[in-house]
Amino acid sequence: MSDKEPPQEPRSADELLDIVDERDRVVGQARRADAMARRLRHRTVFVLTRDGADRIFVHRRTATKLVFPSLYDMFVGGVVGAGESYDTAALREAEEELGVSGLPAPTPLFSFLYDTPEHTWWSRIYEVRCELPVAPQAEEIAWHAFLDEEELGRRLAEWEWVPDGAEAYRRLLEWRHQGRSPAGPEGPNGFPRD
């Protein structure tokens, strides 16, 4: 018998998630690792965080992340737990990743279905202002800075970004430019149709 214990999956791999259909209705539950391995559609939140100077929080994910390790992201966020609301998950994830407490409730903007051959999840986009000093979660974030939109725009072509975050940001810019929700299977406010 070896003194070494077998390596364990990251704690997040064991999180229980709601599995949803193409209209974002719950149809079951699965462990996060199983949802990712079997491409089961679940829910995520993306929170664009601005500081008091209106700069956007940008970070590089740690190499130990279950999905998209070591890539850059302009959102904080993550999966919505089983039975958890999008709004609750957005606040929880933002406070955890930024290392703050007492953050105002993030404002929901719109939802979209992220669907690729490898991944599928319903994503709700939020925005929040954080004027508190941040102390990002070391297990989640390897590097961070607040960038103005012009610098972020330059970095989009230079850095390797998480594909779902890049798609969410593209849709957010389109949504702002057009003053309405992005095209897709969503209802008038960008949230899934009933």
Image: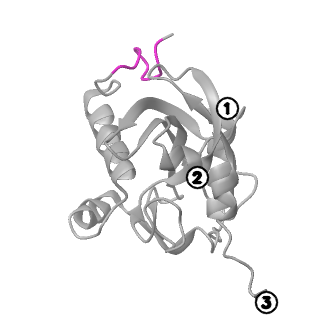
Q: Secondary structure at mark 1?
A: loop
Residue type marked 1:
Ser
Q: Residue at x 45, y 30 (%)?
A: 111
Which residue in the structure is indicated by mark 3?
3
Residue 24 appears at what percent x and percent y?
52, 23
Residue 74 occupies quadrant: bottom left
Residue bounds of the magenta highlight = 185-193
Mark 1 and mark 3 lie on one chain; the one further toward the N terminus is: 3
Residue 52: say if magenta.
no
154 shown above or below 168: below
> Does the magenta segment cover residue 190?
yes
Task: From this view, report whether residue 51 is shown above or below residue 48.
Answer: below
Q: Secondary structure at mark 2?
A: helix
Q: Viewed as shown, does residue 192 lie left or right of 83?
A: left
Q: Which residue is mark 1?
A: 85
State the residue position of label 2.
33
